[in-house]
Image (cartoon, helix red, strand yellow):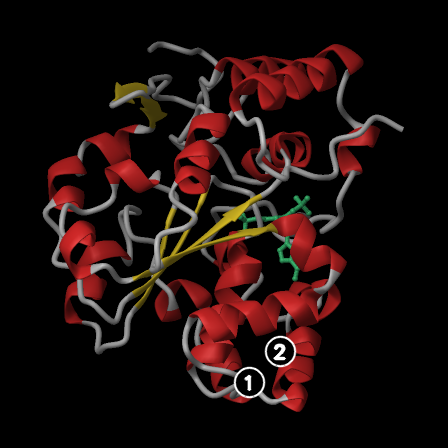
Amino acid sequence: IKLRQYGRKPQLFRYRGYVFPDFVVNDIKNNLHFEVREDDVWVVSFPKSGTTWLQEIVYLINNGVDVEDAAQTNIEERFPYFEWIVPGKQVLNKMESPRLIKTHLPLSILPNQMKSKKPKIIYIARNPKDTVVSYYFFLTKFVIDDQSFVGSFDDYCKLFVEGLVHYGPWWKHVKEAWDRKDEDNILVVFYEDLQEDVHRAVRDIANFLNKPLTESQVEAIARHCSFDTMKNNKAANYDWLKDVGMAKQEESFLRKGQVGDWRNHLKPEISDQLDEMVASHLEGVPIRGMLTS
Ligand code: A3P
């Protein structure tokens, strides 16, 4: 699919009903044949759904709530992005168990061994209106590279509605996870739930991981993972992208961290189209934060 709005290499590729950038399709065989371990923990999402927030929570649950340890190492090293070029699979293959793995691949395109090894999977979903806004602003933070988006916000919204953005269509990604939510090794959480009651969400996630927490541990995680604390935490806020010249200095990866910021950006027609998308494809899925004011 040729789209002039995507950087210097304006191409997206279709694969099994989804649209991916080149770095995903080029490595798809290695992705599918990756050796899964039973005690892996996978955080899966459509991009900009609160993945990093969930990763930091999962990391702390897994390391006995040692916030000082978490602050020592960049989140991409602690919790590698599976299909990205670096650190990705090379690092994961050598990593000690239990491994924590982030991916934006939809459940149907995860490694074949997921079916037999059944590692724990936590899927996070966010309403599409805030997701599209967050994604657009994220893509504009980069100093131009192959993956960045050079079209306008309106262009981006239209492509998102058509499913023509990286990892799109959004609804299909979410639907797959929701349809499998009752499987023992899968937990589906929503960004809006974390916003509503982060203590409850942290407790639920810890119980799912068979690592129940004391109330003071829950409180410590909630504090360490609040928007303001994470925004200032170099090990979680992706500031290293600025250090290596990939992101613009004035930008912050943790942008607003709110439910409903779409009201400040989305055109009514796009908002309506996203309402329709949810109504027609995601009946019964508790997507929240969508109502027009
Ligand atoms: P906004 O762009 O709306 O601010 P992902 O990690 O999947 O890329 O998602 C990024 C989005 O999650 C951004 O949304 C970011 O600000 C938000 N986010 C990250 N950490 C957060 C936190 N601790 N609390 C609330 N929102 C957070």
Looking at the image, can residue 239 be seen? no
In the foreground, 46 or 203: 203
The picture places residue 227, in percent across and down from the top left corner, at 71, 62
Q: Amino acid at mark 2?
A: Ile
Circle 1 or circle 2, nearest the eye: 1
Q: Amino acid at mark 1?
A: Leu
Q: Is residue 268 left or right of residue 170?
A: right
Image quadrant where residue 20 sits: top left
The picture places residue 210, in percent across and down from the top left corner, at 41, 78
The residue that disc 1 covers is 213
**First in sequence: mark 1 or mark 2?**
1
In the foreground, 220 or 236: 220
Image quadrant where residue 102 sits: bottom left
| Residue 275 numbered mark, or none | none
Is the residue marked by circle 1 packed among few (<14), some (14-19), or many (20+) residues within 10 Å?
some
Q: Quadrant of the N terminus?
A: top left
The picture places residue 108, in percent across and down from the top left corner, at 27, 37
Question: Mark 1 near mark 2, Cβ–Cβ under 8 Å?
Answer: yes
Residue at position x 28%, y 20% from top? 13
| Residue 221 numbered mark, or none | 2
Is the residue marked by circle 2 packed among few (<14), some (14-19), or many (20+) residues within 10 Å?
many
Q: Secondary structure at mark 2?
A: helix
In the foreground, 155 or 286: 286
The picture places residue 123, in percent across and down from the top left corner, at 45, 51
Whether 103 is drawn above or below 199: the answer is: above
Q: In the rendered picture of this protein, how many numbered marks are placed on residues?
A: 2
Looking at the image, can residue 126 be seen? yes
Single out the residue that lies furthest toward the right: 293
